Amino acid sequence: MKKRYAIPLILFALVAGAFLYLRTPSTDPAAMEAKYTNEASQFVEGPNGLRVHYRDQGNKAGVPIVLLHGNSASLHTWEPLVHRLGDEYRMITLTLPGHGLTGPNANHDYSAKGMHEALELVLTATGVERFVLGGNSMGGWLSWRYALDNPDKVDALLLLDASGMPLREGEKAPPLNLAFRLLSHPAGRFLLRQYTPRMALEKSLRETVSIEDFIDDAMVDRYWELYRLPGNREAAGKRFMVDREPHFADRVGEIAAPTLIIWGEEDRLIYVTAATTFDERMPNADVIIYDGVGHIPMEETPDMTAADINAFLDRVL
């Protein structure tokens, strides 16, 4: 009888010990801040201990462009555009709650309203009242949602592979990347909170794009280390359970601001057909599709993205 219970207990102890041994530790916030800030980095504090990382760069006399990143990214994703557009425009980027050096929101509010509160903190800190608003993926969803509520502030919209539109008739859910597939299930969310191997983040990043040349070890390290900042892994799981309020997609036609829709034809996270849906519903939209490009065109093909944004803004502003 004792042997019968002893063997399972030993096996359980071995599995538990292996799990604890292999558990990926969190990164040190001070070390991450020292590594991933630059001379343009600033922080603005808000309620519940929220501390938003942002950068205000480029031509301070130029038209402000405010940019919002996608899920699991950070303001660093916009640096290629900052370098290419900063001579003419004032480039304001921020890291949203639950991401990067901003870290988790104490109230765990990762809804559009909660994310917009972080945006408002940065707008107040920079003194910007009217601006061009742009976003990629989740940041695109937050951008058009903000434009719906604040039409007097947004002079133009830039939507790069933006989320928020429903699948078209007959479409199945997109394949996603490894991390997003795991986050879509409770067991996967639990595993990623505890065990986050670097190779899994690299695989997810490469599955997100079509052009991989810009991905290097430093970029993979940045994604991996910032994802493991205390609280960010838990926040990633909570974001996947947030109600994206799909009924707002029916109201996108209320947005009168001129809108540039840029999409990578090879996007495996949000089908390129979503660009057509945006175009059909928005009265003042232009659409540009990039052949051979995936989900993050501003990093995969930054020269072309910057040139198209510049030409669009020259025309509409």
Image: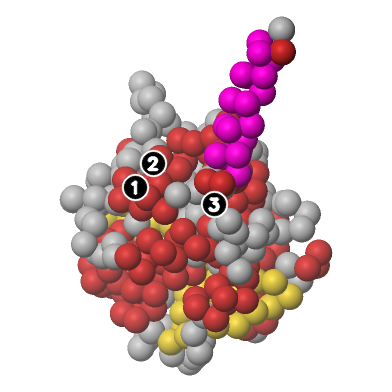
The percent position of residue 88, horizontal first and vertical second, equals 37, 86
* Colour setting: secondary structure
Under tag 3, what secondary structure? loop
- Tell me the residue that label 3 is attached to: 24
- Tell me the residue that label 2 is attached to: 177
Q: Is residue 41 left or right of residue 109?
A: left
- Tell me the residue that label 1 is attached to: 203
Find residue 313 and name its label: none
Q: CA distance from mark 2 to mark 3?
A: 20 Å
Name above or below for residue 271 compared with residue 144: above
Q: Is residue 132 left or right of residue 316?
A: right
On the image, which quarter does residue 288 sit in?
bottom left
Name above or below for residue 145 compared with residue 125: above
Instruction: Kindly report which numbered mark, 1 or 3, lies closer to the viewer in this rendering.
Output: 3
Q: Earlier in the sequence, mark 1 or mark 3?
A: 3
Q: Is residue 60 left or right of residue 317?
A: right
Under tag 2, what secondary structure? loop
